[in-house]
Amino acid sequence: MALAAFATKLSGALFMQRLPPSPTLERLLEGMAAAVIAAIVASAAMTADARSLLAVAAAALTMALTRRMVLSLLVGMAVSAGLGLLGIDPGIVGWWRPGKG
Amino acid sequence: MPQDPPPTWTDIALGIRRLLPISAFVLPFGVAYGAAAVEHGLTPGQTVLMSALVFTATAQFAALSALTEPVAYLSLFMLVLTLSGRHVVMGAALGRRVSHLPRTQRLGLLFLLSDANFAAAQDPRGAHENALGLLIGGGLALWLAWVLSTGLGAFGGDALGDLSPFGFGAVMICFFAATAVSILRSKPSLAPAMAVGAATSAVLHPVLETGWNVIVAAVAGGVVAAVLRRDA
């Protein structure tokens, strides 16, 4: 398992180091780096419950307004924890998922 | 993407400080994993060792369901390879930025690569933050939190009870969403790549195995960035 995990991290880096420098390749890599973050958010949102989605929206909005990461996380967690501790289930949002809604 | 200068201890310390709050939020996941691993038949020592050497939460959680007697090593290897496939993309994106580092530092940095410190390294706060320092320092903070909390869960997870009402489960996705917003604010030219990445990932999510949608989405976003900015 450790070998497989390390191999995934190493293989991409080794491959790219062997390619000749090119501005297009640099743009491709920069785009990939940004897109992978957006893709992880989208992928997680597809399986998240409504409580988590509200928390994410609150965190993203806080970040957009303040650019403060820790504050954004605290707001996100406060929304999630608030709803969780109050026992509030915001309802169905998973209408796009098979078997939901 | 410019090469960053080799990180100093100050850069690494800054990385630790930047990712420390995120590391705190890793703790509940580690505790949950530690408790689950022991339930699945691993000893507490094996559980901690696995976290220390593998350091890939998604794959570790998934591997628990594949633990059989006798252990199917090839299946476990393939499972981890598949679930960690996005790290190939992250490693590729970092390839040129780490090529000038000494081998030990380069290998150490890649071992410590995780989703959270990769995201932080894409969004340095001003010139005083070194992206490679964020990767190494942030990775160290995350690794330590993961290993310690795994140990806590493995040796005494039952005593902590159910942590799910406290909302820790949403924190990691909050972090990624906030990082995405921050990147969009500092580099608006990457918006099309990120939009294509998000859309591709969402559309492919029901179709592809876990993780592969993210890999395809990252490549699609990269192609869009390369094509659009060449035309710009």
Image: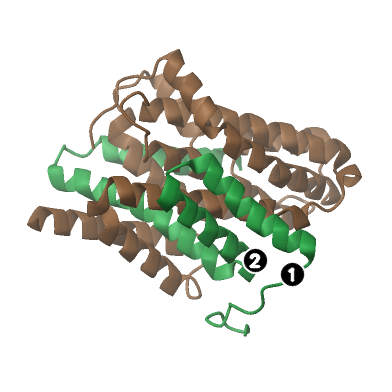
Chain colours: A green, B brown
Q: Position of residue B29 (x, y in %)?
A: 70, 46
| CB under 8 Å between discs 1 and 2 | yes
Classify residue B102 by image quadrant.
top left
Is residue B222 at least partly visible in the picture?
yes
Residue found at the very far front of the displayed protein: A65
Where is the N terminus of chain A found, in terms of image quarters? top right
The mark found on residue A51 in the picture is 2
Rendered image quadrant of residue B134: top left
Q: Residues within 10 Å of mark 2 (few under 14, many from 20)?
A: many
Q: Element at badge 2?
A: helix
Say what secondary structure mark 1 lies in.
loop
Which sits earlier in the primary sequence, circle 1 or circle 2? 2
Name the residue beneath numbered marker 1.
Answer: A88
How many numbered discs sit on the rendered protein? 2
What residue do we see at 58% from left, 55% from top? Answer: B79
User: Between residues B70 and B56, which one lies in front from this camera angle?
Assistant: B56
Q: Callout 2: residue from which chain?
A: A
**Farthest residue in the right direction?**
B159
From mark 1 to mark 2, how far is it between C-alphas?
8 Å
Q: Amino acid at mark 1?
A: Ile
- Front residue of B120/B150: it is B120
B156 horizontally vs A4: left or right: right
Q: Looking at the picture, which amino acid does disc 2 mark? A: Arg
> At x 37% / y 30%, what residue is drawn?
B131
Q: Nearer the viewer, residue B82 or B30?
A: B30
Marks 1/2 same chain: yes
